[in-house]
Amino acid sequence: MERLNVHLKNRLADLSKAKAEGRKIVGYTPGGYMPEELILASGAIPLGIIRGGDHSMVEAAGAYICRWIDPFCRAQIGYGTSGEDPYYNIIDLLVVPVTDNNIRAISDILAYNTDINIYPFGVT
């Protein structure tokens, strides 16, 4: 547990250092559909984007999407469009494995409303 705590505490600083050294950071939404091996094979660093815990981000997504999209996806939209989330700000590409319309909303809304490079992965 101590090793995990240290890793999580230093994760953003480690990613910033790697980016400064020229490494690319590829974020992806969870679900097991994005093979991290593809990202690693390209020399980039995979970063699972699983943000949550701030209900104001869910509410902020209301400016972009209807309320019946699931709260996890609305939170990702809120974090991504806020421009304030350090993990969304550090990624070079966000891969969104399109598995349903809720997840697809993340891809569509962030592609249209932000400067984040989006790659919808799967059936689009």
Image (cartoon, rainbow, N blue to C red):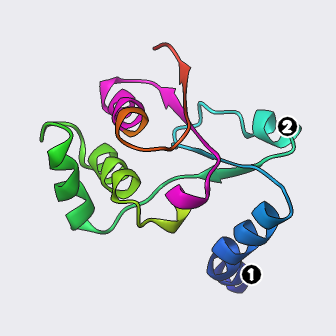
Q: Residue at the location (56% across, 38% down)?
A: 117
In the rendered view, would you say 124 is above or below 74? above
Q: Mark 1 — residue?
A: 3
Q: Residue at the location (73% across, 40% down)?
A: 36
Q: Quadrant of the N terminus?
A: bottom right
Residue that lies at the very extreme toward the left in this rendered image: 67
Residue 115 lies in the magenta-colored region: no
83 to the left or right of 48:
left
Percent from the top left, x then y, of residue 92?
65, 47
61 to the left or right of 116:
left
In the rendered view, would you say 111 is above or below 24? above
Percent from the top left, x then y, of residue 100?
36, 24
The tag on residue 55 is: none
Q: Amino acid at mark 2?
A: Ser
Percent from the top left, x then y, of residue 69?
21, 37
1 and 2 marks in contact (CB < 8 Å)? no
Q: Amino acid at mark 1?
A: Arg
Query: Of 94 and 116, which appears nearest the observer?
Result: 116
| SS at mark 1 in the image | helix
| Residue numbers of the magenta segment | 88-109
Query: Of 30 and 18, which appears nearest the observer?
Result: 18
Whichever of callouts 1 and 2 sits on the residue coming sooner in the sequence is: 1
Query: Of 93 and 50, which appears nearest the observer?
Result: 93
Q: Mark 2 — residue?
A: 42
Q: CA distance from mark 1 to mark 2?
A: 27 Å
Q: Quadrant of the C terminus?
A: top left
Q: Residue at the location (52% across, 52% down)?
A: 49
Q: Quadrant of residue 95?
A: top right
Residue that lies at the very extreme toward the top in this rendered image: 123
